Amino acid sequence: MNKRNAYLPLFFGIAVAAGIFIGSIFNFKNKSSLFSSNTNEAKIKRLINFIQYDYVDKVNTDSLLDDAITTMLAKLDPHSVYIPKEELQRVTESMQGKFAGIGVSFLMHDDSVAVSGVIKGGPSEKAGIKAGDRIIIANNDTLFGKSIIKKAGVVLSERGTLEGNRKVSDAVMKALKGEVETNVNVVVYRRSTNKILNFPITRGEVSITSASAHYMINNTLGYIKVDRFARTTYDEFKHDLDELIAKGMTSLVLDLRGNPGGFMDIANQIVDEFLEDGKLIVFTKSKNGAIDRSFATNKGDFEHGKLFVLIDQNSASASEIVAGALQDNDKGTIVGRRSFGKGLVQQEMALGDGSAVRLTIARYYTPTGRSIQKPYNHSDNKIYNNDYLERIHNGELISRDSIKVNDSLRYTTPKGKIVYGGGGIIPDVFVSIDTMGTFNGLWYNNLSPFIFKYIDNHREEMNKWELYDFVENFDKNDNIFNQYVGELDLTAPIPPEGREDLKRYFKAIMARNLFDETGYFMITQKEDNMILKVIELDSRK
């Protein structure tokens, strides 16, 4: 996963929330007492007033309060977090699966906003915006050259850096996004016709995909990738599931690698597609001992299909609810590496100024009764946050035998399988992390700019490709790939193995630019060890 992330192009059109959390609908029975005035509240207000009016130097009390809230929550658990108002909208949009805007993805190319993709059915597609267009003005905002750099507040040392790019992306999105049914006048430069074009666009709701890829690996084995459990994820997943079933799918790969979680009820809906009526999916337990159980219904459309669930060290929260529910009910095969280990449930609570907290209000348990929450220290999260490094050092990413289990947290499934609590879901079939690949940043640093420029210069020709034909036949003689390699400033030739890795990702990113994530995964997964293991397992009768 690390290597794949290093190769991703810098798309800024759609912001994706970072961090591991789980959302759920819980109601407070005592809201009046929760928000009533008390001495602690008065103490905090008085201190803020003292600092604001009497402290010797001028200080930003809002910033002080933000820091205090963050520190306070950190002493509770690693997943109770503060979300500043500057970040809340972005996080909310990602988890609701939609935002109000014009419906384009874009990247910065030579200090201009280049449209890298137009969302199907969105306002921009309806208006006539095309991939490759340069957005130069939105209403009265100039979005190219020094104007956008200045507008974004990017200093010289930040130009070309991730932070600088983020600031520019935020400035562009601020100009393009707005309320639904509001208007924005977009002026673009279209290279193919060498013309300046004016597009009045009415902003609308734009979907943010969370089930990012689906396709048939072979005649009977289907694949669905779920990136997070957003409010719209189940509907996306069900659409993909139905489409693959119609194509003859009898076995499914559900890829939850790198999925940080999301809404619990959405995870439960997806599990319900696989479990028989009445099977326990998950239960939660609050501070006062109240237990809330979730059960499968009779509506599942893949209850009798063969199922493989892919997890890794970055699969967390709602991903672990899915994997744990299936494993504990002896449904399917969990493939990969030990998951993150988050068994806490948070609820988002608004603080009244546009910011919010996500506060842990319950623990969840898999059907056998195990908590998969890994240990944490209430006063110091350093060890908890360094867990991935510890997994590297103890060798568990390479060998299943290096995974430490606690015999006191041993459970048995209905069919006699031994499972463990206390720190993530241990897969039924272990697949080690790939350590054989050769990586050199110099080979990949210019990949995204080259690919965008190549497509931009050959857009009419590239738009003729169909996805499956592209996957099998694009650049078979390596002419385009060799052109890229020839532009690299190398002191030594790329070794054969490194060259094959680079070629695969070159083609995959080209496919993503032309199509979507499905194209990317169809190409990278030809050498994906977990997918290859699933194909082997599925072939066994």
Image: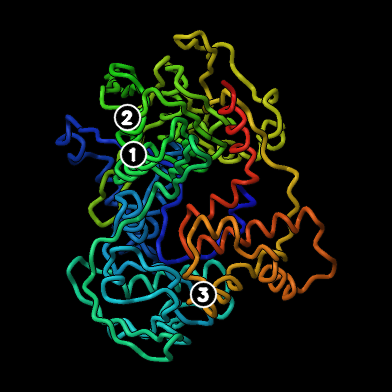
Q: Residue at x 17, y 31 (%)?
A: 30
- Whole-percent x and y of residue 119? 35, 64
- Whole-percent x and y of residue 466? 48, 61
Q: Which residue is mark 1?
A: 242
Q: Earlier in the sequence, mark 1 or mark 2?
A: 1
SS assignment at label 2: loop
SS assignment at label 1: helix
Of the numbered discs in the image, which one, if any, rests on residue 461? 3
Q: Quadrant of residue 245?
A: top left
Q: Quadrant of residue 532?
A: top right
Describe residue 492's horizontal placement relative to residue 194 as left or right: right
Q: Measured along the vertical axis of the image, is residue 525 above or below residue 329?
A: below
Q: Measured along the vertical axis of the image, is residue 487 above or below residue 26?
A: below
Q: Which residue is mark 2?
A: 301
Q: Amino acid at mark 2?
A: Asp
In the displayed orientation, state which residue is furthest to the left: 32
Separation of residues labelled 1 and 3 (CA atoms): 33 Å
Tell me if residue 50 can be seen: no
Q: Earlier in the sequence, mark 2 or mark 3?
A: 2
Separation of residues labelled 2 and 3 (CA atoms): 41 Å
